[in-house]
């Protein structure tokens, strides 16, 4: 049984099917769990996505990751999206900070089956950084729905050729966990290599910058 994830709320939320399957669940992580998970969240000083095996975190965050990899979580998504995800590889990445260049409109790569985003920011007053599901590839204001990245909110969608999304620019702390089911093991290895290389480069930049100051 889930300790942190409110799968009852997930199951009770209707799936929107147009223009691509998606749903939003407020309070997917209960308030009682948020403080412990956020206290154990990876301390990230650079923008970008980092694989969870490349960062350090505490036991409450680890327990959350274990639930995301659990059968109950997968089965809830299979039922909601009408898919068989058994045996599909997964990848989990985390973000801690946002760069003004982030948020450009995209659909996610074809290697992804479902994208799950769980936001972990205590509050959000900024106009930027609010993810928008979109009807087109070229207009950030052609909005289906806008999601403030407030702690405990889940946004999930089935990746497709029209699963456009992006957000207005924002610079600063913006915590989000991204979990994906992928099409093949090979795609998982490619995704991990890409993220690992990117994470190593960002750490190198962080080491160089103080020396230049």
Image: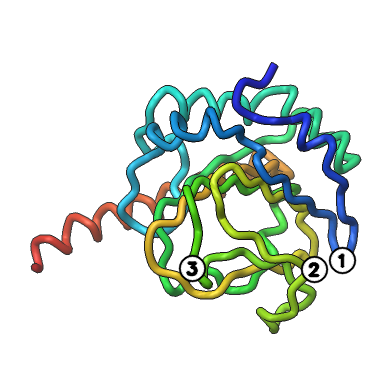
For marks 3 and 1 on the same chain, the one whose residue lies earlier in the sequence: 1
Residue ID for mark 1: 19
Q: Nearer the viewer, mark 2 or mark 3?
A: 3
SS assignment at label 3:
loop
Q: In the image, residue 6 lies at what x, y percent?
A: 69, 30
Quadrant of the frame with the C terminus = bottom left
Residue ID for mark 2: 162
Give the distance between the C-alpha atoms of the residues marked 2 and 3, in whole angstroms.
27 Å
Quadrant of the frame with the N terminus = top right
Residue 25 drawn above or below residue 79: below
Q: Is residue 190 visible?
A: no
Q: With 39 as the anchor, is 87 left or right in this view?
A: right
Labels 1 & 2 near each other (Cβ < 8 A):
yes
Neighbor class of circle 3 (other Cα within 10 Å; few <14, some 14-19, many 20+) is few
Q: In the image, residue 141 lies at what x, y percent?
A: 69, 81
Residue ID for mark 3: 126
Q: Residue at x 53, y 72 (%)?
A: 127
Residue 49 drawn above or below residue 68: below
């Amino acid at each position: 049984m889930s300790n942190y994830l409110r799968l009852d709320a997930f199951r009770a939320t209707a799936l929107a099917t147009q223009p691509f399957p998606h749903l939003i669940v407020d309070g997917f992580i209960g308030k009682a769990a948020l403080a412990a998970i956020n206290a154990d969240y990876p301390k990230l000083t650079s923008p970008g996505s980092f694989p969870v095996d490349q960062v350090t975190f505490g036991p409450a965050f680890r327990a959350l990751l274990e639930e995301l990899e659990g059968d109950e979580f997968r089965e809830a998504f299979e039922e909601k999206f009408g898919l068989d995800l058994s045996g599909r590889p997964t990848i989990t990445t985390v973000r801690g900070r946002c760069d003004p260049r982030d948020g450009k409109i995209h659909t996610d790569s074809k290697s992804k089956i479902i994208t799950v985003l769980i936001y972990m920011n205590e509050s959000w007053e900024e106009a930027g950084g609010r993810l928008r599901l979109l009807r087109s590839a070229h207009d950030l204001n052609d909005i289906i729905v806008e999601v403030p990245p407030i702690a405990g909110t889940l946004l999930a969608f089935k990746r497709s050729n029209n699963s456009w999304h992006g957000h207005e620019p924002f610079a600063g702390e913006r915590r989000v966990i991204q979990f994906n089911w992928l099409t093949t093991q090979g795609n998982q290895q490619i995704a991990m290599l890409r993220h690992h290389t990117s994470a190593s480069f960002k750490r190198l930049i962080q080491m160089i910058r103080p020396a230049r100051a």
